[in-house]
Image: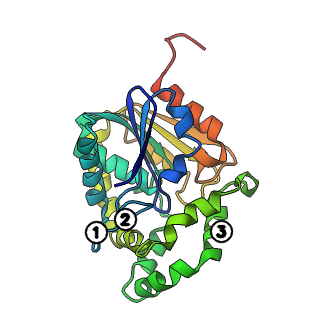
Amino acid sequence: MRYLRDGVGPPLLLLHGLLGYSFSWRYAIPALARHATVHAVDMLGVGFSDRPRGLDCCLRANAERLLCFLDAVGMAECDLLGTSHGGAVAMMGAALAPERIRHLILVAPVNPWSAHGTTMAALLSSRLIAPIFLRAAPHLQIAYSFVLRRLYGDTARIRPGTLEGYSAPLVTPGAFDSGISVLRSWTRDLRQLKSMLPRIAHIPTLLIWGSMDAAVDPLSATRLRENFENCRLVMFEGVGHLPYEEVPDQFNNAVIEFLEPGPPGNL
């Protein structure tokens, strides 16, 4: 499993979304590393990590591998930040080992109250469509640009090199296999996740969303928030699914403020 490491301080693990990898955190790592020891992983089957044939990418399997990573790098506990599908993995990992997670930061996490993506997951993972998609996907570079633009609230904020960075690992054979595996268990995984949420209700949690998120419904933030005893919601107006790229300074400040709150009474 490939990962990036930087900084000194309390351990903070960054977990990318379904179409991302550690590249997603290129604007977050330098800022957060001034306050924490940051680890940003490429989950197995994604980015520049290994792609074992037949890898089980259901939510629980990904979460269990995440906990194995903590063991491998000697991290007894950590603050855990996950985005999109990585946010769902983060919640499942925390539910499996709540004693190891100090704080949760969930950025537009896939959750049981957002219907976005459910139909597409069923379609792309079907026995008829999946083989066609896996053969065609590596040759659909123009589609990557369309998907990226859809994830931004303001496409003028897409910086040079973004599309190229996300596209780089997609030329590797088997680049889309893990994604199809994730989609096959999508609905079942969300049902299981919902049943596990009481196990993490006590963990201090920060939810971050963009009001123009087209991938995970911003309205689901309220329902998800109700499952936590101590949960703060930050909604960035006019921002899409990738606030850590679209408004990185505001994003980084929100995370740092949550992990390092000022003295009581300060305004």
- Picture coordinates of residue 202, whole percent (x, y): 31, 33
| Residue identified by numbered label 2 | 45
Residue closer to the observer: 108 or 160: 160
Please tell me which of labels 3 and 2 falls first in the chain. Answer: 2
> Relative to residue 187, is residue 154 depicted above or below?
above
Neighbor class of circle 3 (other Cα within 10 Å; few <14, some 14-19, many 20+) is some
Q: Secondary structure at mark 2?
A: loop
**Badge 1: residue crowd in 10 Å (few <14, some 14–19, many ≥20):** some
Q: Which residue is mark 3?
A: 145
Amino acid carrying label 3: it is: Ser
| Mark 3 residue element | helix
Q: Position of residue 121 (x, y in %)?
A: 44, 72
In the visual, does 264 lie left or right of 193? right
- Whether residue 243 sits left or right of residue 47 in the image: it is right
**Residue 113 horizontal/vertical position (percent):** 44, 56
Residue highlighted by disc 1: 55
